[in-house]
Amino acid sequence: MGSDFLPHIDVAKCIGCELCVKLCPNNTLAMVQDIPLVSAPEACTYTGACQEICPTEAISLIYEIVFLGENKKMGRRRL
């Protein structure tokens, strides 16, 4: 995954429960001063497990949808 597409962690919502760190199948996240951080961005495969397990919805994943128009030109929209 590129650096544009990594889990975003809202530290204001995070309660430091460590569930996301423990569940991540690729060890992408690590706890630093009671807050999960993306410590191994190259390992992230965007499984969504961290977002799904978070009890406070502090983690969001950014997705990009690519539209192909009639002229086969690509349009991009980030969600």
Image: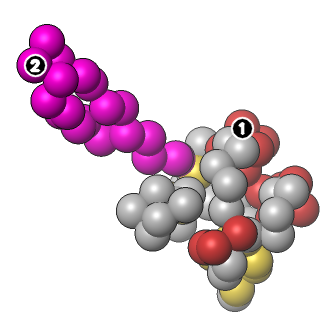
Count of picture labels: 2
Q: Residue at x 45, y 69 (%)?
A: 3
User: Residue beneath label 1, please?
Assistant: 52
Asked if the stretch drawn in magenta spans residue 74, the answer is: yes
Q: Which residue reaches farthest top?
A: 70
Element under disc 1:
helix
Please state the extent of the stretch shown in magenta in the rendering.
60-79
- Asked if the residues shown at circle 1 and circle 2 are in contact, with their CB atoms under 8 angstroms apart, the answer is no
User: Residue beneath label 2, please?
Assistant: 71
Residue type, numbered disc 1: Glu
Q: Residues within 10 Å of mark 2 (few under 14, many from 20)?
A: few
Gap between marks 1 and 2 measured at Cα: 37 Å
Q: Is residue 61 left or right of residue 37?
A: left
Q: Which residue reaches farthest left?
A: 71
Q: Is residue 43 left or right of residue 17?
A: left
- Report whether residue 36 is seen: yes
Name the image quarter holding the C terminus: top left
Residue 54 screen position, x and y as percent? 71, 46
Q: Is residue 54 left or right of residue 1?
A: right
Q: Residues within 10 Å of mark 1 (few under 14, many from 20)?
A: few
70 lies above or below 79: above
Element under disc 2:
loop
Q: Nearer the viewer, residue 30 or 76?
A: 76
**How did the renderer colour the structure?**
secondary structure
Residue type, numbered disc 2: Asn
Residue 1, by quadrant, is bottom right
